[in-house]
Amino acid sequence: MNLPVSLALRGHHTTDDQARAAWTQVMATLREVDAIFSTWRPDSHVSRLGRGELPLDDCPPEVAEVLALGELAERQSGGAFRIRRAGPDGEVVLDPTGVVKGWAVERAADHLRVLEATDFCLSAGGDLACRTLDPETPPWRIGIEHPLDPSRLIAVVPVSTGAVATSGTAHRGQHLVDGRTARPPTGVASVTVVAASLTWADIDATAAYAHGRQAAQWLRTRPGRTGLVVWADGSTTLVDETPGVTGTNRESDGKASCPGIGTTRDGTVSERPAVARGAHASGESGTGGRQPGAAFDHHEREPGSADQQQVEQRVLTQMMRQRSHVDQLVWQ
């Protein structure tokens, strides 16, 4: 799959050499992770480990770290989330993809944290890691696509520092299964999770989705998480762990606003924030000379398609206008 990766910067370092060097390091980290963990590359460490050609001790230490996270997620999800699944011939297939993306983006974001007096919003395939240093600066506004109509927003999430991850099948088709049954879950269209860690926001969004009709019920057991579950009929359930917020875990029709995650009134996109699988990111102008965040359109398309060429042209135009950076990683 094509995984679009975008970065919005605001503050002291946006277009200087330090910003460009940090962006280069971000992409280098993601490519290194791909070389180790891609299940589509037969020469990756994970592929060789899964085939029994390489012992775990001979893999980079990151492999053991990711496998441990996957095993912990399996226990905490009651088996709905699994990194090992039955293959078409009944053999056990190792696939830590559900852990790797959020973990990798969070790891790559470390290169941005060294930029002094600079906020960032790093997005990979719609999962975002954000930082805002000045509490007086408006938060990043993360728009959540409607899984039944990706041209609309179903919610807007203000995030100063934290992570947002969405799990669903709107862009990639049915690729998620309940680890307990090895079957696709039913009744749920998407799950978005807001948390301090992108690793766990991504894991929990996937695990909640795998629970199907029990997605919101399971997500309520996760401390420190705020979530939005969109059901197959377009209705929504908010799971809000914000301190002091009452009336949480409510059912709605997707039109009522609520603390933390605000659903749009009519679902239409009035602004054009960044579009990546399930999420949009928009920065607001701050004080002290801060720059506005980027507004990019990204879609998962096959390389060379007319749609992708149009997207890339818009990205290039907006990149020059808004002093942000964008790249695309082929993550397979």
Image (cartoon, rainbow, N blue to C red):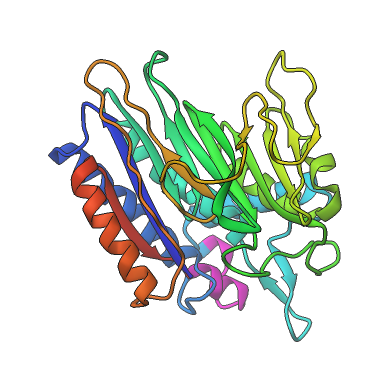
Drawn side of residue 78 relative to residue 244, left or right: right
Q: Can residue 304 be seen in this view?
A: yes
Q: Determine the residue positioned at 51% across, 76% down.
A: 40
Drawn side of residue 96 relative to residue 92, left or right: left
Compared with 265, 314 (above or below) is below
The tally of labels here is 0
**Residue closest to the eye, 65 or 28:** 28
**Residue closest to the eye, 42 or 64:** 42
Compared with 92, 320 (above or below) is above
- Residue 166: where, in percent of width, then height? 60, 49
Q: Determine the residue positioned at 65% across, 23% down.
A: 259
Q: Determine the residue positioned at 47% across, 27% down.
A: 161
Q: Can residue 54 be seen in this view?
A: no
Find out whether residue 48 is within the magenta segment: yes
Find out whether residue 134 is within the magenta segment: no
Q: Which residue lies furthest to the front in this view?
A: 266
Q: Provide the residue span drawn in magenta.
A: 45-57
**Residue closest to the eye, 28 or 133:** 133
- Residue 141: where, in percent of width, then height? 47, 33
Q: Main secondary structure of the magenta part?
A: helix
